[in-house]
Amino acid sequence: MRIDIITIFPEMFEGPFTESIVKRAIGKGLVDIHLHNLRDYSTDKHRRVDDYPFSAGAGMVMMVEPVDNCISKLKSERHYDEVIYMSPDGELLTQPLVNQLSMNENLIMLCGHYKGIDERIREHLITKEISIGDYVLSGGELAAAVLTDSLVRLIPGALSDETSALSDSFQDGLVSPPVYTRPREYKGWEVPEVLLSGNDAVINEWKYQQSLARTKERRPEMYNLLEAKSKK
Ligand code: SAH
């Protein structure tokens, strides 16, 4: 998978991409991430990428031309499956959407700033708009890093135990069961007896029941969906 990120703050991705699973996946050649500084595509001598909005109103707006220059150059080099704009009013990022996007080869992610981007970019250049939640960030960089991380960990070979992505929350419409590690007892706080039984069938059933109960309690809307499906 190849991901091209268009941003005015490429350095914000240091950290998210230089540690842990994403770092390892890049190192193994499983994902190719390219950061493009939008200012490099400005034709203005001060490398400006934003301007005042038409009509009154606070905040600057990102201009069409630098974004078009960058996206056009990338598109002339290869086919992109989606050109994504990170936006608070976009489709909410959920595990099913991540699963679906993980099937793609080449993705562009555009990070907005200020008051947002000129609407004509969204009309003519963007194919998908994604929000990471109903709150407003100051820029699209953190959102693009979240989306990238969620995608990279699904690439076969990115996680050391490949099955572990499948047993994560949301993959089967359930949240994960609780997990424990040694010691068996700490300050009188005990690990559930069943996990020490060594009986895989019993343990798996316990985990499943825990997942069900937690989903019912913490994500009732997800639980209702599951119940509705099982009644069909
Ligand atoms: N005025 C805009 C918000 C602009 S915030 C509005 O009210 O919709 C600046 C940039 O941050 C946006 O262009 C977008 O790229 C990014 N951003 C903010 N919140 C986000 C969210 N929840 N999900 C994804 N991107 C977000």
Image (spheres, rainbow, N blue to C red):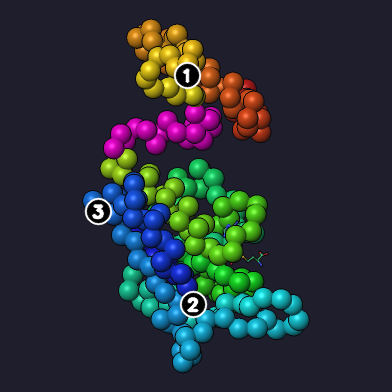
Please state which of the two labelled residues, at mark 2 or mark 3, is closer to the viewer.
3
For marks 1 and 2, the one nearer the N-term is: 2
How far is mark 3 from mark 1, CA to CA? 34 Å
For marks 2 and 3, the one nearer the N-term is: 3
Q: Specify start and end residues of the magenta stretch as a single range.
A: 160-176
Q: Quadrant of residue 2?
A: bottom left
How far is mark 1 from mark 2, CA to CA? 48 Å
Q: Is residue 164 magenta?
A: yes
Task: Out of 154 and 228, give the one closest to the viewer.
Answer: 154
Disc marking residue 27: 3
The single residue placed furthest to the front in the displayed view is: 187
Residue type at tag 1:
Lys
**Residue 225 visible in the shown view:** no
Residue hosting label 1: 207
Kindly identify the residue that appears in the image at 29 percent across and 54 percent down. 26
**Circle 2: element type:** helix
Q: Residues within 10 Å of mark 3 (few under 14, many from 20)?
A: few
Residue 105 vertical position relative to residue 123 in the rendered view, above or below: above
Q: Can you give x and y, in whole percent of width and height, for residue 8 in the image? A: 47, 73
The single residue placed furthest to the left in the displayed view is: 28
Residue type at tag 2:
Val
Residue hosting label 2: 67
Kindly identify the residue that appears in the image at 42 percent across and 74 percent down. 37
